[in-house]
């Protein structure tokens, strides 16, 4: 397959590589949503067992008070720290920028999108660094994307697109690596493990309290109990899969950058990409299982 060249004889990105990058970008955008899905799954399990606790009271006022408490907790209690939520958003914006920059859509028509995504990306990195008292994320990736707007001559549009993509992935490699590391730290923390363990014991306690206080528990409650206990196990699995996928995403991005820079063969890069893609397939299946179980 022919390789497009840019001025000065430097190697640019081939059409085959553009296709590989687009696929990788789409998978990365999907991945960026999973850590928050885990936290939402924990919150939904807490809400479901709270309904059991409320159902333990036959007095209408007590019953309603408990239900209102559940609503208030779900609205007011954000279990994801703002700094961590920003990490997910940065990864999502990077993936969307990568997808746009490798798109087959007319490059000139994409310029406004590049500018907006680039500005958002840099602003999110600034927000994260202001909130973080420890490690700071590297800046400048969004600026590289925004600079892609400076294209005016139709004859060089395609070449400029290839050159801009190469600069973008090289600039972002440290950022992606740091984002993956921060995700792994967050999901591997004792706090997340304790949250999941608390739901496992909480389901047991709420169910026991419901059966103790109600004189006529129904068989549907037994089925709900089994479904919720399965959900907790699936959340544990989803957490472990997401941690593994973050590591493979980091490796896959490094290999993608190396291949674009002519340091690795596309075949070797595909091996690392496929490890990440397999993780994504397992994550999709695990999340579908969580949603199928309830609550």
Image (tube, helix red, strand yellow):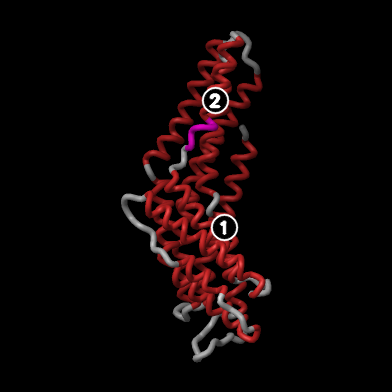
Return the residue nearer the eye: 171 or 191. Answer: 171
Return the residue nearer the eye: 245 or 153. Answer: 153
Which label belongs to residue 70?
2
| Stretch in magenta | 74-78
In the rendered view, would you say 269 is above or below 38?
Answer: below
**x and y percentages locating residue 75 in the rendered image:** 54, 32
Return the residue nearer the eye: 36 or 283. Answer: 36
Residue at the image point whose x is 57% and y is 80% from the top: 160
Res 54 quadrant in image: top right
Residue at the image point whose x is 57% and y is 57% from the top: 29
Residue at the image point whose x is 52% and y is 73% from the top: 147
Q: In what quadrant of the picture does the C terminus appear?
A: top right
In the rendered view, would you say 228 is above or below 162?
Answer: above
Which residue, as the protein is rendered here, is positioned at the far bottom?
8
Q: CA distance from mark 1 to mark 2?
A: 32 Å
Which label belongs to residue 104?
none
Return the residue nearer the eye: 8 or 253. Answer: 8
In the rendered view, would you say 293 is above or below 27?
Answer: above
Image marks 1 and 2: residues in contact by CB distance under 8 Å: no
Q: Of label 1 and label 2, which has the lower sequence position? A: 1
Q: In what quadrant of the picture does the N terminus appear?
A: bottom right
Instruction: Please tell me whether residue 52 belongs to the stretch shown in magenta.
Output: no
| Residue 114 visible in the current orientation | yes
**x and y percentages locating residue 250 in the rendered image:** 45, 62
Q: Would residue 178 be found to the left or right of residue 154 on screen?
A: left
Say which residue label 1 marks. Answer: 29
């Amino acid at each position: 397959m022919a390789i497009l060249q840019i001025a000065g004889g430097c190697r640019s990105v081939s059409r085959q590589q553009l296709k590989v990058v687009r696929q990788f970008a789409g998978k990365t955008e999907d991945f960026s949503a999973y850590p928050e899905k885990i936290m939402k799954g924990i919150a939904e399990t807490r809400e479901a067992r709270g309904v059991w606790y409320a159902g333990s009271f036959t007095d209408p006022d007590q019953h309603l008070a408990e239900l209102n408490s559940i609503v208030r907790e779900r609205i007011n209690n954000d279990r994801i720290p703002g700094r961590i939520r920003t990490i997910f958003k940065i990864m999502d914006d990077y993936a969307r920028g990568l997808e746009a920059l490798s798109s087959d859509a007319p490059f000139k028509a994409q310029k406004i999108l590049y500018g907006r995504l680039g500005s958002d990306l840099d602003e999110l990195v600034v927000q994260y660094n202001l909130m973080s008292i420890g490690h700071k994320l590297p800046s400048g990736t969004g600026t590289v994307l925004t600079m892609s707007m400076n294209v005016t001559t139709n004859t060089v549009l395609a070449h400029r697109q290839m050159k801009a993509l190469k600069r973008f992935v090289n600039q972002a490699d440290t950022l992606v690596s740091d984002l993956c590391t921060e995700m792994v730290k967050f999901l591997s923390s004792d706090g997340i493990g304790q949250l999941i363990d608390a739901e496992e014991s909480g389901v047991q306690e709420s169910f026991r309290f419901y059966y103790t206080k109600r004189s006529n528990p129904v068989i549907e409650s037994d089925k709900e109990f089994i479904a919720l206990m399965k959900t907790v196990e699936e959340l544990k699995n989803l957490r472990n899969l997401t941690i593994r996928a973050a590591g493979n995403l980091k490796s896959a991005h490094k290999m993608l950058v190396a291949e674009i820079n002519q340091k690795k063969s596309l075949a070797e890069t595909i091996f690392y990409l496929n490890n990440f893609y397999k993780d994504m397939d397992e994550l999709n299946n695990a999340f579908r299982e969580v949603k199928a179980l309830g609550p």
